[in-house]
Image (cartoon, rainbow, N blue to C red):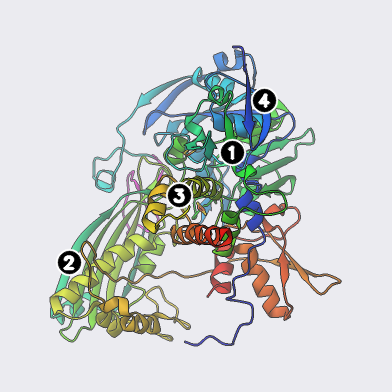
Amino acid sequence: MSIPREFKYVGTRPIRHDGVDKVTGRASYGADAAWPGMLHGAVLRSPHAHARIVSIDTSAAERTPGVRAVVTGSDFPETTAALALGEAAIDLRDISESMIARTKVLYHGHAVAAVAATTFDIAKEAAEKIKVVYEPLEPVTDIDRAIAPDAPILHPTLKTKGAPEGATGPTNVASRLELKRGDVDAGFAEADVIVEREFRTAMVHQGYIEPHACIARCGEDGRAVVWCTTQGPFVVRDASAAIVGLDPAHVKVIPSEIGGGFGGKIVVYLEPLAIVLSRKAQRPVKMVMSRDEVFRATGPTSGSKIRVKLGARRDGRLVAARASLWYEAGAYRGSPVGAGAMCAIAAYKIPNFFIEAYDVVVNKPKVAAYRAPGSPMAAFAVESAVDDIARELKVDPIDLRLKNANREGDQAPYGPKYGPIGLEPLLETARRHPHWTAPLGPNQGRGFAVGFWFNAGMNSSATVTLNADGSAAVVTGNPDIGGTRVAQALMVAEELAIRSSASDQASATPTAAASPTSPAAAASAMRRAWP
Amino acid sequence: MARLHIETTINGEPAEFLCDPHETLLSALRNGLGLTGTKEGCSTGDCGACSVIVDGRLVPACLVLAPEAQGRTITTIEGLSSGDALHPLQQKFLEHAALQCGVCTPGFIVAAAALLDAKPNPTEEETRFWLAGNLCRCTGYDKIIRAVLDTAAHIRESAV
Ligand code: FES
Ligand code: FES
């Protein structure tokens, strides 16, 4: 693989456009804004992981002085819309119900009602006065319980997509898919060493330092303006519009600076609540999550159970792989298990394999994207097994990986042929690096693993304006999540062969003024500009 | 409930605000005084995003009650630059690219300023230990530590 040309600007490290604002505390993040006349919102959350909602009585909250609006699930229309989205597909009905429960609560922290009042304290105290009668149900908190024949069922109407013919009855398995090539049994029969192991990983939260926050204002004309911290202002616009029943053209999203997201700030949690509260109260409504709410009620990545079996010949060639992946989706379907299956052995040329992947609902928050969604758990399992093979064969772990590395033109386990990929030169470089052979000190260890991700940019767009002085301004619809402005500016400078270009306040660009851009595009722009 | 009237000094200037008795200093700074450079990441004293200096001592503003500000001297991130020049720590954070999303950055810079006030020549270990109460989810810390050590070296050199 070669880099096609020498770069002049790409790869340099100018001081970023938003740097001074960020080191002085002037940059405005989600919770930093205040709008005239705004109210403060608070959410009442379920104390049960799994329960039927028998009744909700909001009258005491509504009577509380200072309270201007109360909403529950019944204030939101049923929606069946779906939103196609780069690294994770979004079912808006699920997002809507995950945002506020209707007939059942499906995780501890599931929102049940929200209140807007003149102060946050009043809103919070009023929310606690809402009387919810629950009928608690057995919670399903891990894969084994969820797929047991007598498991409590989260969604009575859920059917397994991709289930073998004849599968019937209620289930917690939302989908099943398989990837295969060659003859796995024959592959294992010709293997000299076989390793078989099972791994489990826990749900892990993205842990961004900035909690979710927004302000929404719904005007007399029914149009909404939303200020919020998000990785995807266009997703917020389209999802919020569908959830509250507005035309997307009547929702303007103004992204704030964003204090980390790692995939977790693509979904809407507060924005539709704030819009409907604002519509009822006819005042702007600000909502900010506590850290506790972030951890209880926003998207972590899937916990998983993964079984891996690898077979290799004595010369180190991997000849067969079998893997079963079960990923926790949280309360609503849509774990990234498909990506996990596609990535699991994507680094290696293995002639015979069979991979099956199950998306399983459990009584935990609905998972969200998280840094190469689905891939890390699969890599953890497969790479651990590859290391076991290296140990059994007494070969260097890098040598073993080099022997099996996929190269340009090889076929990916999920179908297409690879374009240029850097695995082989990367392994060679690592093997030559002094760190690989340096003596280890006390309490030091050394390991090696390979990971795979697709690097899809999805839809992205930018407007570049040439200024009279020969500089250029760049406007995109992406928030700057850690250097996007400067990365985009460098690419524009490179392509236009001008000395510098000012990437405009991309994050201050409202959806009404920028062209649709997917959250993946920002990450991918940074990967390209800082090789 | 009657609100309390608090008089204090913030970033070298007299300041006053009204607060509830149970309100935190963090809330008073951010909501009462509009000083939103001090961030809230946890409200439980775990992340350091709300670091401020009260009477020379580094504290998480989320664990200080607003009424405790009465008669004290408080420094926040807004008080570090001098108007036309950045504080050396701010400059070095930029040069070392010691921030990504930047939401932890004010807390780190205030905490590091308190460190350099107390100890102008910290070792790397002392610096890492001092900043252990500040969480950053983006950078991996290394550039932050380098920026602080480089600032210390720079301040010492310019003092000679
Ligand atoms: S907000 Fe004060 S330590 Fe996190
Ligand atoms: S730069 Fe994002 S948390 Fe530190």
- For mark 4, what is the residue? B16
Closer to the N terminus: mark 4 or mark 1? 4
Residue beneath disc 2: A196
Gap in Å between the C-alphas at discs 2 and 3? 54 Å
Residue lying at 31% horizontally and 82% vertically, measured from the top left: A431
Q: Residue lying farthest right?
A: A468
Going by the image, does A410 lie left or right of A195?
right
Residue A179's place in the image compared with A398, above or below, is: above
Q: CA distance from mark 2 to mark 1?
A: 58 Å
Q: Are marks 4 and 1 in contact (CB under 8 Å)?
A: no
Measure the alpha-carbon separation of dots 4 and 1.
Answer: 15 Å
Which kind of residue does numbered mark 2 sit on? Answer: Glu
User: How far is the residue under mark 3 from the one under mark 1?
Assistant: 18 Å
Where is residue B78? Give x, y as percent: 64, 43
Q: Earlier in the sequence, mark 3 or mark 1?
A: 1
Q: Where's the N terminus of chain B, which quadrant?
A: top right
Q: Position of residue A518 (x, y in %)?
A: 60, 60
Q: Are marks 2 and 1 in contact (CB under 8 Å)?
A: no
Quarter of the view holding residue A7: bottom right
Q: Are marks 3 and 4 in contact (CB under 8 Å)?
A: no
Category of crowding for the residue at label 1, using alpha-carbon neighbours closer than 10 angstroms: few (below 14), some (14–19), many (at least 20) = many
Up/down of A225 relative to A83, above or below: above
- Viewer-side label of 3, 1: 3
Estimate the spatial distance between the alpha carbons at disc 3 and disc 4, rounded to whole Å: 32 Å
Quadrant for residue A245, please give it: top right
- Pointer 1: what residue? B75
Helix, strand, or loop for circle 4? strand
Q: Do the residues indicated by labels 2 and 1 lie within the same chain of the protein?
A: no
